[in-house]
């Protein structure tokens, strides 16, 4: 839940880096929440809850994906590769599961940012 709220706090921050854990927990929580709201829409006959949540979450989703791509040393513009049918989303998925190799042009490796210095 902290990663989900953290992504909304940094909803317009397209700089920096995001760990795999941060990205995937946000994505998991996003899809679960969307599915629950879509079910409520259908059950209650109130249409628009899921779509409102989707559009409300669109900028934070692009933002965290951009920061995740930065973590592996890629530009956030690589998100546009999903425009290519079939192969584009697969390429982006491969990028999103890669681990970072250390410090890069987008900042220090986020995995070690919160560790105390001894």
Image (tube, rainbow, N blue to C red):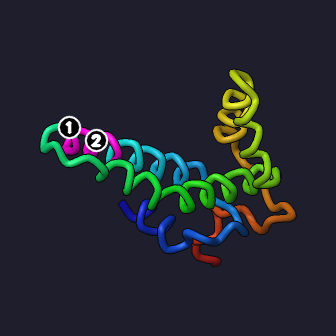
Query: Could you say whether the residue bearing mark 2 is in a helix, strand or loop?
Result: helix
From the viewer's perspective, is residue 33 above or below residue 117? above
User: Is residue 41 toward the left or the right of residue 9 in the image?
Assistant: left
Q: Residue at x 28, y 41 (%)?
A: 38
Which quadrant holds the C terminus?
bottom right
Q: Main secondary structure of the magenta part?
A: helix
Q: Give whichever of 84, 28 is nearer the camera.
A: 84
Residue 42 rendering spot, x and y as whole percentages: 20, 37
Which quadrant holds the N terminus?
bottom left
Q: Give whichever of 4, 80 is nearer the camera.
A: 80
From the viewer's perspective, is residue 30 above or below residue 95? below
Residue 69 located within the stretch drawn in magenta: no
Query: Could you say whether the residue bearing mark 1 is in a helix, strand or loop?
Result: helix
The magenta span reads 34-41
Task: Give the residue at the far top of this rendering.
Answer: 86
Q: Give whichever of 35, 3 is nearer the camera.
A: 35
User: Is residue 47 toward the left or the right of residue 86 in the image?
Assistant: left
Q: Which mark is residue 42?
A: 1
Residue 95 rendering spot, x and y as whole percentages: 72, 38
Q: Which residue is mark 2?
A: 38
- Does the CB distance between marks 2 and 1 fall below 8 Å? yes
């Amino acid at each position: 839940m902290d990663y989900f709220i953290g992504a909304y706090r940094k909803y317009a921050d397209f700089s920096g880096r995001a760990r795999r854990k941060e990205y995937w927990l946000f994505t998991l929580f996003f899809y679960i929440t969307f599915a629950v709201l879509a079910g409520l829409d259908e059950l209650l006959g109130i249409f628009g809850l899921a779509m409102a949540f989707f559009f409300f979450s669109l900028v934070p989703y692009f933002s965290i994906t951009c920061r995740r791509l930065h973590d592996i040393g890629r530009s956030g513009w690589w998100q546009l590769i999903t425009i290519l049918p079939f192969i584009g989303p697969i390429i982006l998925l491969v990028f999103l599961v890669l681990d970072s190799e250390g410090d890069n042009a987008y900042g220090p490796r986020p995995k070690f940012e919160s560790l105390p210095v001894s």
